[in-house]
Image (cartoon, grey):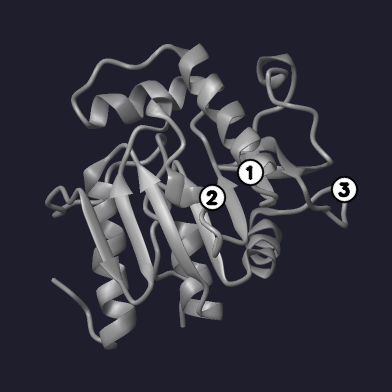
């Protein structure tokens, strides 16, 4: 039912058309809002009902494109890197497992030492899945395997930073009923998630 329903927000692909910017919504125990993670980790990400923090932060060149899409100059890479570290530390401080995808090699050496690491594929490129406060039972996984693994680990409610079009939380909600809190810098991404949530909760397409 959900195989091709949800879009994945990639710097390599055109934006989804026909969306009006939306800053925030809440529906059926799920919420999403426009937020730049370089401004800090939202307190709702570490609320007592959150059972997993998941993030697919932008790579250096992709970040430039994402900021262009909202009409803002790109932030410095070290600020984005700091926001990723802050997300991991926030999870650790509240005993919430954190999973994060990243590239390979020295450019990502700023990340705290992970409890588990697996090879994976991100937008067709080789990457890593890092985990803190939890384990990864395999050494490598495809994108589909990573999706299933994250959904299995999400539990009651997942927090998703740099969420894009909300591919992971929407799939978790559709397939397991997992609630979510998600954020992205682009208000049109929030509008897309809202559109799909209306479809999921009403059973009919939302124009």
Whether residue 102 is visible, yes or no, is: yes
Q: Earlier in the sequence, mark 3 or mark 2?
A: 2
Q: Earlier in the sequence, mark 1 or mark 2?
A: 2
For the residues bearing labels 3 and 2, Cβ distance under 8 angstroms? no
If the image is split into quadrants, where does the C terminus sit?
bottom left
Q: Identify the residue position indicated by label 2 in the image.
A: 46
Image mark for residue 53 = none
Label 2 secondary element: helix
Label 1 secondary element: helix
The residue lying toward the viewer, choosing from 207 and 180, is: 180
| Relative to 196, 118 lies left or right | right
Q: Identify the residue position indicated by label 3 in the image.
A: 139
Within 10 Å of disc 1 (Cα), the crowding (few <14, some 14-19, many 20+) is many
Q: Identify the residue position indicated by label 1 in the image.
A: 91
| Relative to 35, 174 lies left or right | right
Q: How far is disc 3 from disc 2 in space, using C-alphas?
A: 28 Å
At horizontal 66% and vertical 47% (from top left) the residue drawn is 98
């Amino acid at each position: 039912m959900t195989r091709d329903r949800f879009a994945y927000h990639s710097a390599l692909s055109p934006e989804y058309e026909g969306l009006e910017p939306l800053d925030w919504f809440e529906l059926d125990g799920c919420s999403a809002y426009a937020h730049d993670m370089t401004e800090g980790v939202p307190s709702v990400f570490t609320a007592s009902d959150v059972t997993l923090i998941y993030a697919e932060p932008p790579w250096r060149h992709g970040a430039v494109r994402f900021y262009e899409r909202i009409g803002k100059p790109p932030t410095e890479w070290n600020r984005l890197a700091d926001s990723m570290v802050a997300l991991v530390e926030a999870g650790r401080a509240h005993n919430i497992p954190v999973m994060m995808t990243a590239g390979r090699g020295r450019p990502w050496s700023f990340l705290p030492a992970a409890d588990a690491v697996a090879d994976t594929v991100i937008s067709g490129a080789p990457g890593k899945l890092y985990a803190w406060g939890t384990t990864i039972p395999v050494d490598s996984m495809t994108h589909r395997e990573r999706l299933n693994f994250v959904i299995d680990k999400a539990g009651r409610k997942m927090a998703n930073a740099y969420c894009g079009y909300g591919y992971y939380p929407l799939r978790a909600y559709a397939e397991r009923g997992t609630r979510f809190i998600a954020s992205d810098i682009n208000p049109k991404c929030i509008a897309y998630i809202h559109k799909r949530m209306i479809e999921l909760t009403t059973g009919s397409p939302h124009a």
